Amino acid sequence: MSNKNIDWNNLGFGYIKTDKRYVSNYKNGAWDHGVLSGDDMITMSECACVLQYAQTCFEGLKAYTTEDGRIVCFRPDLNAARMADSCRRMKMPVFPEERFVEAIVETVRANKDWVPPYGTGASLYLRPYMFGSDAIIGVKPANEFQFRVFATPVGPYFKGGVKPLTLRISDFDRAAPKGTGHIKAGLNYAMSLYAIVDAHEQGYDENVYLDSATRTNIEETGGANIIFITKDGKLVTPKSETILPSITKRSLLQVAKDYLGMEVEEREVALSEISEFAECGLCGTAAVISPVGKIVDHGKEICFPSGMSDMGPYTLKLYNTLRDIQLGRIEAPAGWIKEIN
């Protein structure tokens, strides 16, 4: 049980410095043993590769207190594998996947007093990341790197309840064919900042990006994968080589099949067909599922029958089932829950 003097029930979704973070450095072709540090500041050259050429990638996951009082993480092995893929694509040294999971465990264990109590809706958000740290002036990969994991307690993504979102079809492209859309590189998020600020200024919650080759198929938003529910209860999600493989989406697909008996389909989803779906949602670590009530395509409103007040019935079942698995209310599939003693 946490002993921090925090109003867990009113915690926002932002950064709070915690006690320890994990740090490991790569130099002369090898990773060091790594340490837990109390220092949250990073010192590097003004010419560090990450500052000049954005050679960085990251992950995001959470630790929870379960109903029976255990502290657990959800599928950290998949974050480790995805970060390894990101590193290979970004010409960065892979941090060994087993050590990645160990670093997560060590970071949570060192900050166990910051893990919010069960029933508050809050969790401990974990951010593993890596960057090129030595001075690079020519356009080439760094020679030295730093891998870090910090933790921060966060409240529920939706304060005051879930409200369906209004999205717009973006005129910008998120990722190019053969580009970096399938990895969690910082540069992908940097290029989305102009578009998301513009969307907010225009009264929209997020952008929906189309495939950049034909601009006819739905891909994802700036920070989440998209799922659709057909009128007969089938879960459909876009498939593309430029979509980031969401761990939450992967989990929801299995939950739909194995727990709810739903049919699932991963395929190309044309913009022209989305008006035929009954429900829509965005899935990711922060909120699990964010319901979508409406998508606006250059003035044309595509309203989902699930409406603008609540989650649709299938989306709600998916959300509740996955949250029950994460919080230990129902049995998880083998390997999904990493307990931290």
Image (tube, rainbow, N blue to C red):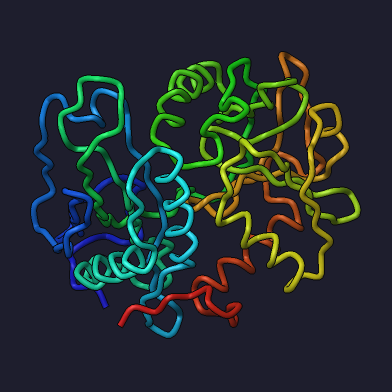
Q: Quadrant of residue 295?
A: top right
Q: Residue at x 25, y 51 (%)?
A: 147
Q: Nearer the viewer, residue 159 or 81?
A: 81
The answer to whether 172 appears left or right of 190 in the picture is right
Locate residue 77, reporting x and y percent.
Answer: 46, 66
When the figure is inspected, residue 159 is found, relative to residue 180, above or below; the finding is below
Q: Residue at x 24, y 52 (%)?
A: 148
Q: Quadrant of residue 70?
A: bottom left
User: Which quadrant, please, contains the N terminus?
Assistant: bottom left
When the figure is inspected, residue 324 is found, relative to residue 204, above or below; the finding is below
**In the image, farthest residue toward the right:** 232
Locate residue 187, reporting x and y percent.
Answer: 41, 29
The answer to whether 277 appears left or right of 186 in the picture is right
**In the image, farthest residue toward the front:** 29
Q: Residue at x 60, y 66 (%)?
A: 322
Locate residue 193, reporting x and y percent.
Answer: 43, 24
User: Which quadrant, please, contains the C terminus?
Assistant: bottom left
Number of numbered labels in the structure image: 0
Q: Quadrant of residue 247?
A: bottom right
The answer to whether 176 appears left or right of 115 in the picture is right
Q: Residue at x 68, y 27 (%)?
A: 211
When the figure is inspected, residue 102 is found, relative to residue 12, above or below; the finding is below
Q: Nearer the viewer, residue 182 or 210?
A: 182
Locate residue 24, reporting x and y percent.
Answer: 19, 56
